Image: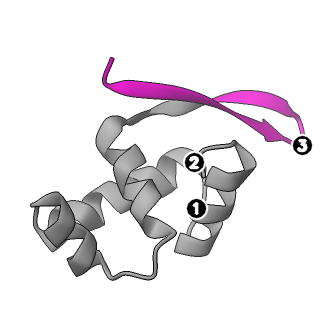
Amino acid sequence: MSTLELVRNTDSGTTLVEPLTRRELVVLGHLSDDVTLEEIASALFVTRNTVKSQVRSLYRKIGVSSRADAVAWAQSVGLR
């Protein structure tokens, strides 16, 4: 399986969030480290633009707009 479906609690109840890909989950794991996008890209053997695109997609899917919010979200759903 290449995706993980997550459930997020909102004020109006629980809603299904668009599935995260395995790579988005890997990138999400790196966001809690004190590293740049370039360093994440190097570790994953991809370009900075690829990581940037994956981060944008990840943020959109989980409904956040910053790295800190993404890390907090991951902790709240038990991913970190």
Relative image position of residue 27 (x, y in whole percent): 36, 56
Residue pointed to by mark 3: 11
Q: Which residues are magenta?
A: 1-16
Q: Are marks 1 and 3 in contact (CB under 8 Å)?
A: no
Residue drawn at x 68%, y 54% is: 75
Element class at badge 3:
loop
Q: Position of residue 36 (x, y in %)?
A: 33, 82
Q: In this rendering, is residue 66 above or below 2?
A: below
Q: Earlier in the sequence, mark 1 or mark 2?
A: 2
Residue type beneath disc 3: Asp
Callout 2 environment at 10 Å: few (<14), some (14 to 19), or many (20+)? some
Which amino acid is tagged 2? Answer: Ile
Image location (x, y in percent) of residue 23? 30, 44
Which label number is shown at residue 54? none
In space, the residues marked 1 and 3 are separated at their CA atoms by: 18 Å
Give the amino acid type for the residue marked by disc 1 in the picture.
Ala
The x, y position of residue 37, in whole percent, is 29, 76
Label 2 near label 1: C-beta < 8 Å?
Answer: yes
| Image quadrant where one finds the N terminus | top left
| Residue, disc 2 | 62
Mark drawn on residue 70? 1
Q: CA distance from mark 1 to mark 2?
A: 8 Å
Q: State the SS at label 1.
A: helix
Q: Compare residues 38 and 65 and report the one nearer the observer.
A: 38
